[in-house]
Amino acid sequence: MKTTFYIVLLCSFLSFSQKSSFDKMIDSTLKKTVPFIHTSVLAKNYADYIILDTRELEEYNISHLENAKHIGYNEFNYRKIKKEIATKKPIVVYCSIGYRSEKIGEKLLKKGYTVYNLYGGIFDWKNKDNTIVNNSGVATNKLHCFNQEWSKWAIKGDKVYSKQQIED
């Protein structure tokens, strides 16, 4: 009996230790109350989803996923967006790494929508060489990193932290 316990414990440890530090951070930060969609799946089937950006407007204005609708986090108002999402299409929510989008996703799930949280958010999207765009719809390398601490998870892209850094 003890042997079986130790084998299970060892296997669990080895499985966890094989995860990247980014995956470990996601595991410890998110509650996983909204199902994930991974960047590779979204990239292949992008047109099948409504994409909602739950970051703040300053972040969205620097760059976002193509055709993503800004809904914000602090000022999120379901009444303002319900017409835009009045469809049977599934919804993908995202933010920097997935925390804020998880909270908004929970609200949308309660309203009866099919919702997925983009695993790793816009950071993972950009880290996996997917395109982000500016407000003109032009591909950009600029990525709002929320703050210095969170920026370590953005491996690719030109890190931006405030409006003053937006100018080329």
Image (spheres, rainbow, N blue to C red):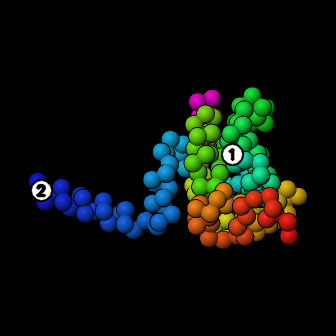
The magenta stretch is 109-113
- Tell me the number on the disc at residue 54: 1
Where is residue 140 drawn, in percent x and y?
79, 67
- Please name the residue that numbered disc 2 is placed on: 2
Q: Which residue is more in the foreground, 47 or 167?
A: 167
- Which residue type carries mark 1? Thr
* Figure check: 150 above or below 100: below
Where is residue 71 drawn, in percent x and y?
74, 41
Q: Residues within 10 Å of mark 2 (few under 14, many from 20)?
A: few
Q: Residues within 10 Å of mark 1 (few under 14, many from 20)?
A: many
Q: Is residue 60 magenta?
A: no
Disc 1 from disc 2: Cα separation: 47 Å
Q: Which residue is more in the foreground, 152 or 26?
A: 152
Identify which residue is drawn at 65% across, 46% down: 93
- Tell me the number on the disc at residue 102: none
Where is residue 72 drawn, in percent x and y?
72, 43
